[in-house]
Image: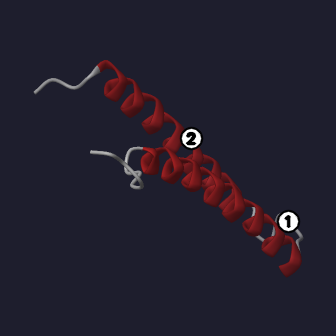
Amino acid sequence: MEKSEKRQRFEKVASNRVQKIIDFLNLLKNCSNRNNYEYTEDDVEHMFSEIQKALKESRNAYNIEMSKNNKSGFSFK
């Protein structure tokens, strides 16, 4: 079975974007080297709190879209 155009586009775009996020997280990981950078535990907590918040918002957007197809409720079926 051939993949739809929308599916192919999603796979291409999502794969590229996920890889970019992973690459940027690896760059952020480089900032953990205390020989080159100075930071506090509060700095780290603030950074990862914001990252987790953004990740949760992204995940919720997908959950909302997926739940649109699974609505149950009143119907005269």
> In the rendered structure, are the residues bearing label 1 and label 2 in contact, judged by CB atoms less than 8 Å apart?
no
Q: Position of residue 2 (x, y in %)?
A: 15, 23
Residue under label 2: 20
Out of 73 and 5, give the one closest to the viewer. 73
- The residue shown at (10%, 27%) is 1
Q: Position of residue 14 (x, y in %)?
A: 46, 37
Q: Identity of the amino acid at label 2?
A: Lys
Rounded to the nearest whole Å, what is the CA distance between mark 1 and mark 2? 23 Å
Q: Identity of the amino acid at label 1?
A: Tyr
Q: Seen in the image, is 29 located left or right of residue 40?
A: left
Q: Seen in the image, is 41 located left or right of residue 22?
A: right
Q: Quadrant of residue 10?
A: top left
Q: Seen in the image, is 4 located left or right of residue 2?
A: right
Q: Which mark is residue 16?
A: none
- The residue shown at (50%, 43%) is 19
Q: Secondary structure at mark 2?
A: helix
Q: Residue furthest left?
A: 1
Q: Residue furthest front?
A: 76
